[in-house]
Every structure is written in structure tokens, then in C-alpha cells.
Amino acid sequence: MAIAIHDTLYFDKIERTNKLQTLVAIAYASVNIKEKKEVIKQLEYALNIFKTPKSSTELGSGTYEGKQAQWSSKYTLSRDFGLVQESKDEIILSDFGMKIVKGEITPKYFISTVVLNYIQVVNNSIIHPLNSIICEMEKKGVMELSKSELKLISDFNLNGRDENNYVGGLIDILQATYFFEGNDNSKLKINEDLFSVSSLKNLINYTFTELTVEVVKEKFGAKNQKEWCNYLAIENPLLNKIILKVQDDDEVKVKVKGDINLLQNRLIYGAPGTGKSNILDKERKRLGGGYERVTFYEDYSYSQFVGTYKPQMNENGEIVYKYVPGPFLRQLANALDPINKGEPQLLIIEEINRANAAAVFGDMFQLLDRDSSGKGEYEIHLSEDIKNYFKYDRKIDIKSLRLPSNFYIWATMNCADQGVFPLDSAFKRRFDEYKLMDINENEREINSITIDIRCNCIGKVNWNVFRHTLNEYLLEQGIKDDKLIGPFFIKPMILKDEEKVQGAFKDKLLMYLLEDVVKRNRGLFSNDAKSLNKINSMYNKNDGKNLIFSEDFMDKLNEKLQKNNYGEE
């Protein structure tokens, strides 16, 4: 058995021994002995280490006697959770399991990593039990769920009934991780000293959302136990940054830490398609903690960003006015809230120059200066509205405000777009990092992608080669570099789709080039393609022979393609 496939959540009835101890016992019982029958015998001795004596004269009170039924229960645990990969009559530890034996990782780290990846097929849908639990906690705004509440989670398809105590088995497993408190089998409670709902959510491996049931069954079926083990062993770099494994009196101590290499105030700018948002999203996952994303636009205002009074309906059905915080105040409150244990709280601002940023920040602009520790250098006195929001809605009693070091503000800016507001130098100075994205940054990620350009008889061409040629030509025509085309101007998933890329090339790339880039300098296009209507009527017609690009550009492209084909580039 590899991935579990059932009508409901399923966890085998496992003997009520400590799960970490069971895994360690199986690991050591099978590390030097491969034959299954011998491993079963050795397991009794391995488990003796963990037995609790009934009296001072007894060595142990465990019930394991090397019986097949008892072995099957424990062995199922080891296979389901990626400790063992089997070859019929032999027991072979997975590579990740071997790390326990070698002392490279602790059993607790092993099982914590596994549950971040662990999935089941339930009622012909892929579920991630830990994710289902965290989403339920997030929905209810709680840090713990009772066993009865767990039975009602819709993903588990138990409908409140659990005659086989599958939820009990799940609780046992999760309480063996860093993430939850142990001992009480009637509930599941997040280890609040170390984690919050949002930080746990950021740790989960969400690749399962990209898979279909058919793919999962084939990929992780009984015949592919090794691949299942490898999947469960995917380590989250963020977990490695959060968990400090320190051996002290055979106890593993852990504490939360952020990524100290990521600055609090950052502004990333550059040409379209250079991957600005993608970079920040990847680094958001490195940072951990909670985050909120907002996009500025021309009429975006202080009241939307910081907060304002808005009409609300109270419990009596009456319309009352209440102070409603915006994303800035919400994330700042999360950073100050003791319940989040000082974990990072990030506000991502997309397209910051599409609004009047200085007006949107208003008096909060004064807070942006940071000292060497990352804390705000200056403080401001709060209005009564904001003070009351902190005091009564968030239970944070403060009279003045200074940015804490765990509050991060990251922004993106696209200088090429029309109708944007220039950022003044005073605003730019408040950002510790003011980075220009290179036009070819991270282009290696799509080096192998070719697209079929259906005009000028171009046909199939490497996307990066075409883009490089286009950018070089634009620069020769006096076009500024912030108007050039980045590697991700068209998303990789679209570039790889033979039909969707046609619409993106015509309606997105060619339109941008005509209306935003070349404008009156139309040397890029042929005399027959000087308007968007003309281009729409010509592209992907006449077997791709219609001349949309100019002869001058095509000479440059053909020269580049010839060199590329002969390996001169």
C-alpha cells in the first residue's frame, strides 16, 4: 500500500504505542536485516527499548510478540508514511528513513516533514489532511479543534461518524509532530509557542492541487512505493529556517526565527514580464508568517489603504458606522498582536506607482524610516479612531505607533505603463532595497520553450531568442529599456500551450508593442500593419505568410536564427 484510496479519511488501527518510537523501532530493526521474517523478530527487541515496566522487577510490559497481525499494523504505518520501501520478501528503508538511523534527522523532524506532504484520495478527490484541518481552523478563527469537530470536516467525508476511530489515528500522528500539542486525544491544538494558523498554512506542500486523481493513483500506487517515499520526503526550506534542531538532554528544542536576510522595506521595479511579482512571492514563502497583497490603482486612497468609517449592519439589523481597517492597518495589527509570537507579517503592494503613493500612505509615510534593527525610527500619535480599533477590536492598547521589525512592506513598480504616478525621491529613500530587475533575469527557467509565430513565415522559434532580437531592435530604434520585453511577459504556462499562445502573442504582445512601445515610431511593423485592426486581420492567416513585421526587423531576426542554429550564440 502506498497512497490511501478510500471513501472516507482512513488511518489503520495502529497499536497505541508512541508513533515516533514505532518508526524508530522499525528503522533500527530493518537497517541491517532485509528478510521480512527476521525483521519481524527483531522488531520485538527494538520495541523493548520503549516499553514501560509494570513493576520494578519487569524489563517491559509491551505486547508485541512477533505475530504477523501485530507486524502488519506497525508495518502499514512505516509504508504509509514513507519510512520503508519494500521488495516483496525484503524490507528496505527509504533514503529519508535512513537519515533517522544515521542520526542526520530526528524522528520528530521526519514525521513533521511527511505530514506537510501527506495526501489521500477520499471519495475520488485528493485531500491533504493537515491542510483540511488548518483551513477549518482558519475559517473558525481558532487554534484547536475537538475530535467531534474533526469528524465533521467535509474533506474527510465522515459526516460526524467514525466507528473505526480514523480521526483518532490522525490525531496520534499529528501530535507526534512539532506542530501540535500532544497527550490529549480528544482534541488537536496548535503548539502556540511555536506556530500560528498562518505560519502552518505557509509550510504545507500545495503541489497536490496541480494533480488529478488519475495521476496520483498512477504516480503513487502500490507499484510505486519508492516514488511515494520520495514525495513524502520533500523538505520545506522554510521549515528548516523555522526549526532549530538542538540536542540537549535528548530533547529537541525548537524556536521560531524569520529569514534575517530579507529586508523590511523593498521596492522591485523593471520592465513588464521580468518576474517582479514572482520573485516576491517566492521570497514571501522563505519569509514565512502571514501576508496580505494589495494592488494600487489610480483612485486608490488613504481610507482604503489605512482605514475609514463604513456603514455596517449590527446584530439588530440596524445600519451603524464602524471603523474598518485597510490592508496596512490589518497587517500592522497582526505584527503587533502577541498571539502571532512575533512572526513576520508582510504587506505586498503591487503596482505601487499606479496610485499617488504619498497621498495613499498619508501620515503613515513618517513610519517608513527604519533603524539598524528593522524597527521604525520614528513614531506617530494615533487618531482616536485608529487607537480604538487597536484597543477594542484587536485588544492592543497603544497610544502611539512605531513599526515593529516583524512588519514587512514589499512593493512592485512597472515604469513602462501609461497613466502612472512618479515616485518622489523622498518616498524612494524609505525603501532599504530599490532594485531594478534585469531584463533577462531568471530567463533560464524558460530556455527550452519554443513558440509558433504565425506571420512573416517565421514558424517555430525559441521564445528567448525571439525576445532578445526584439529587445535589441527596440533599443536600436531609441526605445527606453523599461519598455522592453521580459522573459515572463507571456506566462510560461501560456507559452507552452500551442493554441493559447497565439492569442497572447497577437492580443497582448503585439498590442503592447504597437500602442505602448513604438507608438509613432512604427519601424518595427510593415506598412500593411500600422494599426491594431490591421494586425488582428492579418495574424494567423494565409498560412502565416502575412507580413506584420518590417523587412528591417526580419533581417535581424533571420540573422540571429541562423547564428543560433549553427551554435554561434
Image (cartoon, rainbow, N blue to C red):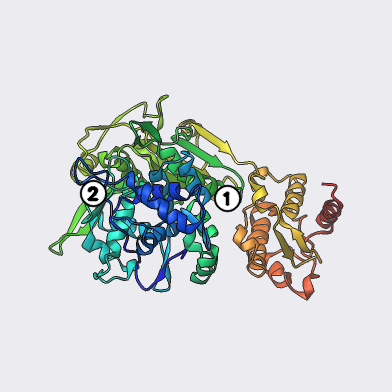
| Residue 231 position within the rendered picture, expressed as x and y whole percent measured from the top left | 51, 56
* Mark with earlier residue (1, 2): 2
Could you give the CA–CA distance between mark 1 and mark 2, rounded to whole angstroms? 58 Å
Residue 468 relative to residue 224: left or right: right
**402 and 546: which one is in front?**
402
On the question of residue 262 being in view, the answer is yes
| Residue 376 position within the rendered picture, expressed as x and y whole percent measured from the top left | 36, 29
The count of marks equals: 2
| Residue 420 position within the rendered picture, expressed as x and y whole percent measured from the top left | 52, 47
Residue at 84% in and 49% down: 567
The amino acid marked with disc number 1 is Asp
- Front: mark 1 or 2: 2
Residue at 45% in and 54% down: 39
Tell me the quarter of the picture where residue 121 sits. bottom left
Residue 337's tag is none
| Residue 89 position within the rendered picture, expressed as x and y whole percent measured from the top left | 52, 62
The amino acid marked with disc number 2 is Asn
Residue at 38% in and 59% down: 71
The residue pinned by badge 1 equals: 417
The residue pinned by badge 2 equals: 183
- Residue pushed farthest bottom? 542
